[in-house]
Structure formats: C-alpha cells, structure tokens
Image (tube, rainbow, N blue to C red):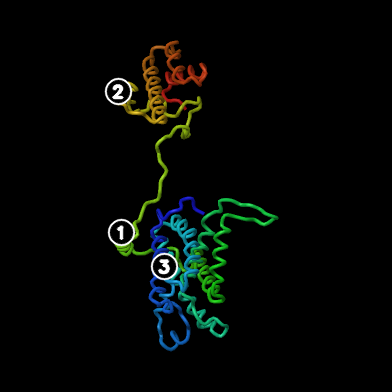
C-alpha cells in the first residue's frame, strides 16, 4: 500500500471514486438504479437501449458493492496513476472502457445460452483492470511466510477483490475477468494501445472544468532543508576532503556576529554548511598565498587547515596543501 494516503497527485482517481460514489447514491435515492443494469432481453434485443452498455460502468446497484470497490480503488488506483501520470492514466481508462464494453457485449451475446444474461451495474471491469496494473507495477512492501504460505502486503487488496467479484456470480466474475484481460492487452501493447493519449485540448478542458470541483493538490515532496541529525552524503576526493574544495566559487557566509545581533536562529544544518564554506575559503586563501613561493607549506598554514578539519591527520593536511600548490584542484 502506498505510504501517501491521500489523493495528492491523483486527480483522475479522485474523480473516478467520487463520481462513482455520487452517481450510485443519486441512483439509489431516486430509485433509478435499475437503469444501470444491462439485461440482454428485453432492453437490448427488443428496446435497443445501447446506451446502457456505456452507462453501466458508472454506478453500482447497492451500497455493499460501492463500499468494497471504493476501498479497492483507493488502495490501487492512486499508486497506479502516480506511476503512469494523470494523462496516461486517463488514456488507459478510456482504452480499458472501450475494450471491456466490446468484450462484455460479445460475451453477453455468446453466453446467453450458458446463464450469462445480463451485465451487472458498476465498474467491475475497470476496478479489476486497475488491480491488474497494480499487481504488475507496485511491489509488495513486505513478505511473510506462515506455515510455508507466503503473505504479502497485497493480501488485503486480494481479499477485498474476492468479495467484490463474488457479489453477483457468475455475472460479476465474467465482467471482472474481462476487465483484467483488457488490462493485460493494454500492457502487452496489443494494437499499439499503450501509445494512445487523450488529446491536449481535451485534457486541458478536463483540467479547467474539474480542477475547481475536485480541489486538485500536488504530490507532497521531500524538503531539501538540512535538519539536525541528518547529513546528506557528499562526494570526496582521494584524500578524503569534499570534492571541488579548491578553486570553487563559494557564497560568502553570514558572520555569526551578524546573526546574533539580528536575533536570527540558524538551522544546525545551515550553520554546519557555513562553517564548512568558511574552512574551504581559508584553504583557498592559504594555498593562493604561497603559490609560487615555496613547495612545502608553512607551519601556520598547516595549523589553520588542521583547525578546520580536526578529523584529518597531519600527513593528509600536508598532502592536500602540497597538491594544491603543485597542480590546483585535488582528486
């Protein structure tokens, strides 16, 4: 399960879950839930109500199926959209809806003699298409073995999916398998389906219209501010000093006295960075001062550099100063 339990960075998933939930509630409140079923007879064979083939994807027949699908989509749709990107994910849903609707219609025509006489209301095909992508893209966060049986973090999703697929057998089983197979065809790039993208104009129209309604938020990002107790790794040269110590352009550090007079409390990480910059500036000044004058550094220069880097031995300090004297940058 994704660690970021929110809709941030997943506006399509947010619209899908909220839209299906709202339409299901409105259909139940207005006693119109029967309009989202797709029975072969008489609505298709006699009345030719073909619009039901597309409408049945957007509302469930009861609240229990809505609850199970909402939990399943919340745990699977959001990480898949963050992996795909919103535009590609929306294109994926359009492709899956088209494939699933076509295969459901063929299955209804061919399977009427075997008991498959109606397509149940609800996005069963879409839910299991997303679940298939989730199992292929999102790795398990843990693996346990209990009595030789492997248990992963995806077990909860599989349990919820088993409850949803068995709600109205055999119809829900058939349409769910059709959804998973549609997702398989998309992943295998059947007929170059993975290359399809929604047009930029249509994408912009959806963004302008639905963003104010959904309250789209960006994905949380890690802070790049250094904090106490956490030091980012730095590249070092062959002598163990930070890279680009010599000859690098540095930003002038803020003096500690100025910070004290202004009453500004510096972050420990920022203060450490400033002390490091001061030390590197002194090294550059020292190496410049004796350039061309002598080959061996003076005791004063060695003392200054040792004070800046107390964890380095005297031999390493002398080698660094001699290297700067002879050739410029170290490493």
Farthest front residue? 29
Q: Return the residue at label 2.
A: 261
How far across and down, in percent of the image, does residue 119 sit? 49, 78
Residue 272's place in the image compared with 17, above or below, is above
Q: Is residue 202 left or right of residue 114?
A: left
Q: What is the CA distance from the residue labelled 3 to the residue labelled 1?
A: 18 Å
- The residue under the point 40% across, 48% down is 220
Q: Secondary structure at mark 2?
A: helix
Residue 276's place in the image compared with 187, above or below, is above
Q: Please name whichever residue, 271 or 233, is drawn nearer the observer in this view of the structure.
A: 271
How far across and down, in percent of the image, does residue 200 sit? 32, 61
Q: What is the CA distance from the residue labelled 2 to the residue labelled 1?
A: 47 Å
Q: Secondary structure at mark 1?
A: helix
Q: Return the residue at label 3.
A: 20
Q: Return the residue at label 1.
A: 212
Q: Are marks 2 and 1 in contact (CB under 8 Å)?
A: no
How far across and down, in percent of the image, does residue 132 sit? 52, 63
Residue 78's place in the image compared with 27, above or below, is above
Sequence-wise first label, 3 or 2 = 3
**Residue 5, which numbered label?**
none
Using the rendered image of the protein, determine whether residue 102 is visible from the camera's viewpoint: yes
- The residue under the point 42% across, 76% down is 33
């Amino acid at each position: 399960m994704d660690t970021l339990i929110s809709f941030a960075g997943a506006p399509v998933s947010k619209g899908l879950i909220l839209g299906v939930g709202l339409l299901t509630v409105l259909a139940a409140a207005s006693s119109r839930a029967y309009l989202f079923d797709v029975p072969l007879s008489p609505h298709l064979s006699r009345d030719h109500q073909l619009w039901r083939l597309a409408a049945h994807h957007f509302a469930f027949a009861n609240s229990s199926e809505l609850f199970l699908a909402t939990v399943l989509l919340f745990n699977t749709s959001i990480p898949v959209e963050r992996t795909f990107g919103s535009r590609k994910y929306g294109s994926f849903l359009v492709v899956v809806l088209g494939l699933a609707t076509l295969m459901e219609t063929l299955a209804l025509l061919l399977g009427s003699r075997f008991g498959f006489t109606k397509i149940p209301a609800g996005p069963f095909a879409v839910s299991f298409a997303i679940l298939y992508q989730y199992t292929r893209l999102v790795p398990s966060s843990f693996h346990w073995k209990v009595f030789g049986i492997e248990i992963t973090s995806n077990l909860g999703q599989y349990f919820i999916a088993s409850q949803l697929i068995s709600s109205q057998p055999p119809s829900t089983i058939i349409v769910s398998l059709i959804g998973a197979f549609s997702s398989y065809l998309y992943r295998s790039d059947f007929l170059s389906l993975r290359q399809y993208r929604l047009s930029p104009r249509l994408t912009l129209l959806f963004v302008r219209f639905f963003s104010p309604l959904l309250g789209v938020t960006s994905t949380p990002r890690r802070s790049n501010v250094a904090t106490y107790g956490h030091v980012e790794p730095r590249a070092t040269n062959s002598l163990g000093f930070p890279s680009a110590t010599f000859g690098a352009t540095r930003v002038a550090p803020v003096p500690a006295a100025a910070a004290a007079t202004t009453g500004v409390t510096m972050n420990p990480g920022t203060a450490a960075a400033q002390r490091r910059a001061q030390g590197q500036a002194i090294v550059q000044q020292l190496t410049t001062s004796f350039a061309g004058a002598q080959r061996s550094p003076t005791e004063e220069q060695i003392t200054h550099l040792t004070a800046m880097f107390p964890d380095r031995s005297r031999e390493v300090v002398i080698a660094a100063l001699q290297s700067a004297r002879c050739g410029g940058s170290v490493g």
